[in-house]
Image: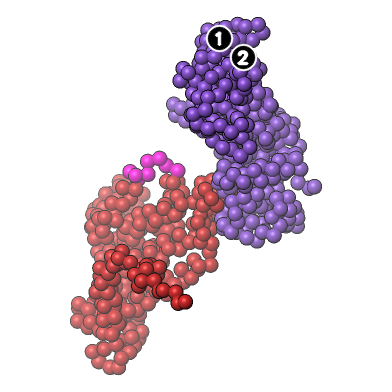
Chain colours: A purple, B red
Amino acid sequence: MAIVSRDFRELRLDGVCRSFGQMHALTDITLAVGRGEFVALVGPSGCGKSTALNCIAGLLQVSAGRIWLDERRIDDTGPEDRGFGMVFQNYALFPHMSVRRNIAFGLATQHRPKAEITRRVEEALALVRLGAHGDKLPGQLSGGQQQRVAIARAVVVEPPLVLMDEPLSNLDAKLRLEMRAEIRRIHAMLGCSTVYVTHDQEEALSLADRIVVLIDGRMRQVGTPEELYTAPSSRDVAEFMGYRNLVTSRAEPDGNGVAVTVAGARLKGTPFEAVGGEAVVAIRPDDLRPTPGGPILAKVEIAEYHGRDFYAVARGPDGTDLYFRSDERIKAGDEVRLDAAPSRVLVYAA
Amino acid sequence: MRQARPPLRWRLREMGLDGVTLLVVPGVLFVLALFIYPFVYGLVLSFHPKQGGAWANYVTFFSNPYLYNTISTTLGIAIPATLINVVASVPVAMRVRLMKRQRLLTTILVIPITLGTVMVAEGLLTFLGPRGWFNRLLLLSGLVSSPVGLLHNYWGVMLSLVITGFPFTFLLTLSYVTGIDPSLEHAGAMLGARARQRFFRIILPLLAPGLAITLALAFVQAFTVFPSAILVGQPQGTTRVISIAAYQAAFEQYDYSLASAIAMLMALVQVVIIVLLLGGRSLLFRGPASSGKG
């Protein structure tokens, strides 16, 4: 395989800040991306993840802090000189150029010999499996094909780093799954370091080696997908990572863990921050299951059929809404008893 | 069994004809009365000369250098004026596109259009005249020893055409430039293209079809120059444009037939240039200047 990412060890962001007027979009981002690593920047919309990516790309100036590529400081160089590949949310293919010329664009600006350009463009086309579409204009391709061209165009110049800005968010659900697999395959094949921005936590979990959660322009947690999924470090991260049940409660020490009250019932939980007094209990809908003799008594309000199982909302005696999953058929109006394993009941300071 | 034909109203609607279609009637009548009828009338009139056969007016025109030279004179003013306006409007529009307060600038630029050419010519007469501010400043600063003659010659008309034509080309170009997805420039930059390469390889090809339209409209505006050619030009010499020839034929010699023939030739020259421009445009990429499903 001729397309390989250029040699480098790591990209380092050192206290990067960016403000727009009085608004602080990014505050103190410090992060290192190693060679071949796939890092996902996630967070709710407006959290600054695209700003962070544009700062790395050079499309936005940083307000403070530094960006290093190994020993080279790059935060004051323009995007033309950083040599990173970028895949845009709207693909940003040049509409007046054929697929081949789009892919060749980066090589042409480097003034590579004609023969080399032709050879590498063909390789890139084969890589994204669009060999038969090389002479078409982008407008003649489907959304998924256009995004594959955009990926080929970004990786054909063998960039040390590929930046992806929500590349799948304009695709429909089925294509999104296909393209996710495609991105994983290309990443595995080329081993190019990737910084991937998404608001879809599922996408981040399935693709990334490491996930960075940004909330309000600050890094709230960095970890492997598993760490973030099972052990969010704070209430906000838990909320973003799909802990839909967030219940305020009083926490009391109880053996190794803490005891909390959810919907009038006592549950054992795992404390994640110094917890005393007021606390927030976070439970995933998947971890809250109907169990015979479970401590929480609730009445089903809404039950959605999801194929193999049901997602449901039940209201506890104190009016708390609880989101849970059930393998058994349930319907609105049923009484259920719910329970969750102590390790899956996460307790944060309020 | 024969399938029942749907009612006529339905079939008409399928073809895009329904009650709303009637709304074009006033417009069609307007065009017929104020454009098609006068045009055809003029065309017919031009073939009924005061003396001689049907083509006599055209023969007269092309055998008299005082008449046929007006074509080259007019082109000599209209083509440079059009090019100056369109070429200058592109960089300005590229810059203004990035500005936050476009409205103030747009307002300032629209004023010359609303004032009209006569007003602008009057302004030029006082401002650029031998005793005007412009020459006084030049004389005071010692840059020149005698007033610069920018009026009653070729340059007066050119200036007037630029002042009244530029805002128009600028506004058109600005709308075309802002129609280009900024992420295309970002993509170009990420692929190592510098500002110059991005402009010539990405922006300009996407802008070209719009520029062709702008050129065509600006050219027509400049080719039909009349008030400023008289007021700030040299209507007997360097700026004796074709509309002056038509005016003189009609209202000084009272030869409406010859005047119509000149008007027809004027229209013909414009049509030729516009066909060339739009023909060239059809060779360009004319798809949306955005990137896929945005």
Name the residue rendered at 75%, 55% in the picture.
A119
Number of other residues with Cα within 10 Å of mark 1, as a class: few under 14, some 14 to 19, many 20 or more:
many
Q: Residues within 10 Å of mark 2 (few under 14, many from 20)?
A: many
Q: Residue A317 location, x and y as percent?
A: 48, 18
Q: Earlier in the sequence, mark 1 or mark 2?
A: 1
What amino acid is labelled 1 in the image? Answer: Ala
| Rendered location of residue A107, percent (x, y) | 68, 50
Of residue A83 and residue A42, the one placed in the foreground of this image is A42
Q: Is there any visible trace of residue B285 in the rendered image? A: yes
Q: Position of residue B118 (x, y in %)?
A: 24, 60
Classify mark 1: helix, strand or loop.
strand
Secondary structure type for disc 2: strand
Q: Is residue A41 above or below residue B202?
A: above
What type is the residue that disc 2 sits on?
Answer: Gly
**Figure check: B264 above or below A303:** below
Q: Is residue A6 above or below residue B282?
A: above
> In this figure, which residue is indicated by the disc labeled 1?
A251
CB contact under 8 Å: marks 1 and 2? yes
Q: Quadrant of residue A327?
A: top right
- Check the residue under mark 2 and report the chain it is in: A
Q: CA distance from mark 1 to mark 2?
A: 9 Å
In the image, what residue occupies the spot 35% across and 75% down? B267
**Residue A213 appears in the rendering:** no
**Residue found 76% across the figure and 43% down from its top:** A189
- Image coords of residue A97 (percent x, y): 60, 57
Residue furthest to the bottom: B53
The magenta segment is B98-105
Question: Magenta segment: does it hold B102?
Answer: yes
Q: Is residue B56 left or right of residue A197?
A: left
Question: The numbered mark 1 sits on a residue in which chain?
Answer: A
- Give the residue at mark 2: A269
Q: Is residue B203 above or below residue B46?
A: above
